Amino acid sequence: MSEQPQLHSSIVAMISLASGIAARHPDMGLCQLDRLRSAGVPEHQINTVIEIARHIRDEAAQKLDTLFDAKTALTAVAKHNQATDCCGSVAPLADAAEEESCGCSPTPGGQSCC
């Protein structure tokens, strides 16, 4: 069995930079940013990676906030229904997530994240 070729170091640095930004890693990808610049990766490509990563991070936070708000509203409705002897079922959090399926929107700069 032959060994598969490794990813180019600049690709690994871009992936690491993007995932660090999206995950809100405390190091903020500064090491990878230095590696990319040292490797001669054009600034516009680095900026695109940063823009997409920030967009994914911000979009994920918005969706989590929306799901949290929906869940807390459903919990309040369920408590109200229980207090009034009403027999209603509360949709689980997963049902709310299905309504949000693959809502990939472009970044403010027009970059696709999908």
Image (cartoon, rainbow, N blue to C red):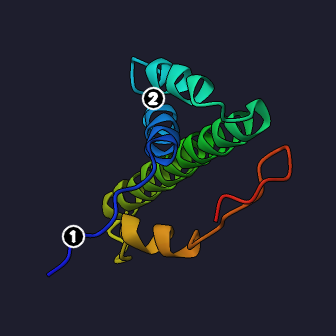
Secondary structure beneath disc 1? loop
Q: Is residue 24 depicted above or below 12 in this figure?
A: above
Q: For the view shown, which residue lies furthest in the bottom direction?
A: 1
Residue at the image point whose x is 77% and y is 49% from the top: 107
Looking at this view, is 107 or 72 the one in front?
Answer: 107
Task: Determine the CA span between mark 2 and mark 1.
Answer: 34 Å
Looking at this view, is 93 or 114 the one in front?
Answer: 114
Quarter containing the C terminus: bottom right
Residue of label 1: 3
Identity, as a three-letter code, of the amino acid under mark 1: Glu
Q: For the view shown, which residue lies furthest in the right direction?
A: 109
- Where is residue 17 drawn, in percent x and y? 50, 34
Secondary structure beneath disc 2? loop
- Where is residue 111 drawn, in percent x and y? 78, 53
For residue 100, what is the image quadrant? bottom right
- Label 2 CA crowd tier, 10 Å (few <14, some 14–19, many 20+): some
Residue at the image point whose x is 31% and y is 62% from the top: 82
Identity, as a three-letter code, of the amino acid under mark 2: Arg
Q: For the view shown, which residue lies furthest in the front direction?
A: 2
Q: Is residue 89 depicted above or below 56 in this figure?
A: below
